Image (cartoon, rainbow, N blue to C red):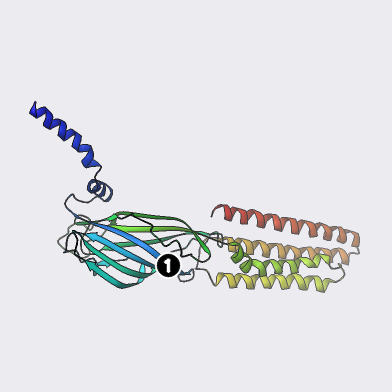
Amino acid sequence: MRHFILILVLCCSLPVWALSPAADTVAHTGASPGCDTVRTGVYITSIHDIDFKQNEYTIDMWLWMRYKNPALDLYNNLEVPQAKTVTKSFATIDSSGDDLYLLMKLQCVMQDSWRIGNFPFDAQTLRFSVENSQFDSKSMVFAVDTVGKAFDPRFTLRGWNIDTLKIRSNVRKYETNFGDTRITKPHMEYSSFKVKIDVSRDAFGLFMKLFLGMYMAFLVAYMCFFIHIDNTDSRFSLSVGGLFAVVGNKYIVDASLPESVTFTLVDLLHGITLLFIILTIIGNAINLRYSKLNQDAKALRFNKLMRRGVLISYILLNAIFIARAMSAQ
């Protein structure tokens, strides 16, 4: 009877152990049961200086860690992958309780890559992570402290909306032994604490600022269809002037964006505008041909057809591509 009771108690305790925080940490990080667990949390106070040309942004935050092993020198061995610069300040270590408690202020200039295919109707993902270079994942793992908010709701990311903020911990793999000859296989694993912030842009104002010059250049070129077909010089001058204005606007917009091998929305809209201005030049040449042949009636009908077709087609194509970029945001 006593053996039966003992077996029953053990069976009942197994589900409780499986749902415990320690078991959850081991299951999600791949850590050994006896490794040190560092409960880590962040409170982001500011994200600013988003620089598309330099592929970087700056993030300010409070970072804290709770752990038991005093051998963990987390302050000096803290690594922030993809960070250009890391500034630590206001660091305090409290050892009065059962756990060691490290709190510090971090300011990091982060290197990141931007998705500019739908710029300025773009959505970006800002990534921040910390690792410990002292111990691998078999000796130390990060666990997420999710109590409270992870960012200050009073701060606003100017021109952007914060859609989601996710925090998790996992294991990052390195296919190298970092020169340690005691490790025969070039493979190392380190625990990583990661923050991912999804942001989307308030794009209407920026769109008008960037593309207003392009649309004005198109309208200048388009006005040639309202000039009498006899004024050939004026018609060609407007079209050629609009062509150079669009090229200049393209260079100005590209100067604020990183290099890209893909065909972006900026390239697409400027390409469409250049194409339609060239169509106006071709239309003027055809009208000139009709005029030289004394076929003014045909010239007037063709000019009217071009005036309607160019404007409707240009507006329709712009609306389609802009709507597609906005829906992908």
- Which of the 4 image quadrants contains residue 83? bottom left
Classify residue 56 as left or right of residue 146.
right
* Camera-nearest residue between 312 and 196: 196
* Camera-nearest residue between 280 and 190: 190
Residue found at the very far front of the displayed protein: 96
The N terminus lies in quadrant: top left
* Camera-nearest residue between 96 and 41: 96
Instruction: Mark yes or no: residue 178 visible.
Output: yes
Residue found at the very far left of the displayed protein: 2
Classify residue 279 as left or right of residue 120.
right
Give x and y (percent) for residue 203.
Answer: 58, 62
Classify residue 257 as left or right of residue 229.
left
Give x and y (percent) for residue 246.
Answer: 66, 69
Quickly name the residue at label 1.
46
Give x and y (percent) for residue 243.
Answer: 69, 70
Give x and y (percent) for residue 324.
Answer: 59, 53
- For the residue carrying disc 1, how many other residues have a C-alpha within 10 Å: few (<14), some (14-19), or many (20+)? some
Question: Amino acid under label 1?
Answer: Ser
Instruction: Mark yes or no: residue 55 visible.
Output: no
Give me the residue at 74% from left, 56% from top: 312
Classify residue 307 as left or right of residue 14.
right
* Camera-nearest residue between 277 and 299: 277
Give me the residue at 19% from left, 37% from top: 13
Where 183 falls versus 10 (above or below)? Answer: below
Helix, strand or loop status at disc 1: strand
- Which of the 4 image quadrants contains residue 306? bottom right
